[in-house]
Image (cartoon, coloured by chain):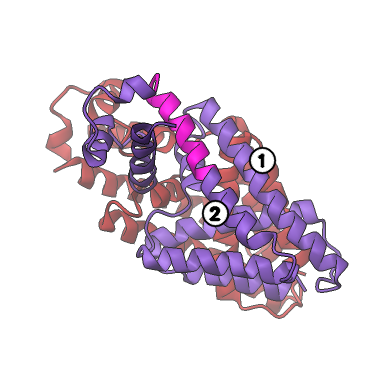
Chain colours: A red, B purple
Amino acid sequence: MSITKQKILNVGAGLVRRKGFNHTGIQEILDEAKVPKGSFYFYFESKESFGLELIEVYVDFFKSKMEEVLTDKNISGLKRIRLFLNNFNELFISENYTGGCPLGNLAQEMGDLNERFSKKVSQAFVMMESYIQNCLKDAIKSNELTKKINVAEMAQFILNSWEGAVIRMKVEKSVEPIKLLEKIIFNNLLK
Amino acid sequence: MSITKQKILNVGAGLVRRKGFNHTGIQEILDEAKVPKGSFYFYFESKESFGLELIEVYVDFFKSKMEEVLTDKNISGLKRIRLFLNNFNELFISENYTGGCPLGNLAQEMGDLNERFSKKVSQAFVMMESYIQNCLKDAIKSNELTKKINVAEMAQFILNSWEGAVIRMKVEKSVEPIKLLEKIIFNNLLK
């Protein structure tokens, strides 16, 4: 990918995460990226196709974070999930609780407006869940988790509930809602 | 409140819920409300102050729904929560899973962009939680709920997780994420 295109996508990823897709103007992205006017449509057919490529940027970000933390077999399954949540809390704190989850944001904003966005975000959620599922499976294998659970359902529930807690964080400007999620998940659901 | 102002707010409530606050134009609202141009700024100082009044429309909607279902002492505490969730599922199904929760939507969209919106939405969430809390207290009193729980924390967790499930619904176009929430909440957390 050309450096200019990469620059547009990186700057766009930050702006769209903070301001929303529809509320971010193409000119604004080009200005911040210091890229000449007219470049946009050289690299992207439309704002929609730019948005669809943006989703891939976000997906790659999550995939690398999840690969890094959630697949490390030297750490127990449940500890990996805890570590992943804590890493994101640190990120959120460093950003003053702004931005939230870029995929949750787009699900909310674009879920009713663009079916192509919806489908891509839905696939991303399924990918994210699969990492959590594997941690839960390892936790069962090692007897770290003895409660009978349906791992596919629990993984989805954890992800969806995390998205909800992240949204609550945005208005509270605090990670307390996410810490509450951790507390209830680990003390009541995963034992 | 004048009929015209009420009309602008009602039409705005529907449009903003589906399209987002920033993505909904004032002209679009006036066109759909069949209200002459220029009326908007007669009733509202700015788009922001319109948005703040919109939040009150949403809050009143939730308050009346919650009063109706969550305070009926003839029904047990946990059944009231179930009923409330089911009523919203029916609404979501009738709307083809679009729209979601207008307050969750605004928390996500405006949480980083406007502190006045954030504060109002945060207060609304606290109000919504208090109804759930009261149901949980009644469930404990009547021994419907015997597990030891912190009612304030559990009420917040249920609300936040519901908001997350509603966002997932938007991309899946299905109430399954909300049914999964119900299943885990009632089978694993509230017993």
* Location of residue B61 in the rendering, given as x and y in whole percent from the top left corner: 52, 49
Give the total of numbered labels.
Answer: 2
In this orientation, does residue A69 appear? no
- Magenta: main secondary structure: helix
Q: Quadrant of residue A127?
A: bottom left
* Residue drawn at point x = 68 percent, y = 55 percent: B157
Disc 2 crowd rating (10 Å Cα; few below 14, some 14-19, many 20+) is many
Circle on res. A34: none
Q: Is residue A185 above or below residue A41?
A: below
The chain carrying label 2 is B
Q: Is residue B154 above or below residue B12?
A: below
Mark 2 or 1: in front is: 2
**Element marked by disc 2:** helix
* Location of residue A3 in the rendering, given as x and y in whole percent from the top left corner: 26, 33
In this orientation, does residue B37 appear? yes
The residue at which mark 1 appears reads as: A175
Taking depth in this image into account, of A106 and B127 the one nearest to the observer is: B127
Q: Quadrant of residue B60?
A: top right
* Location of residue A144 in the rendering, given as x and y in whole percent from the top left corner: 76, 71
* Residue drawn at point x = 72 percent, y = 69 percent: B78
The residue at which mark 2 appears reads as: B163
* Location of residue B180 in the rendering, given as x and y in whole percent from the top left corner: 56, 71
Magenta segment, which residues? B44-59
**Element marked by disc 1:** loop
Which image quarter holds the C terminus of chain B? bottom right
Q: Is residue B140 found left or right of A113 in the rendered image?
A: right
Q: Is residue B179 above or below residue A183?
A: below
Taking depth in this image into account, of B60 and A165 the one nearest to the observer is: B60
Kindly indicate whether the residues beneath marks 2 and 1 are on one polypeptide chain: no
Q: Is residue B143 found left or right of A104 in the rendered image?
A: right
Q: Is residue B139 found left or right of B125 in the rendered image?
A: right
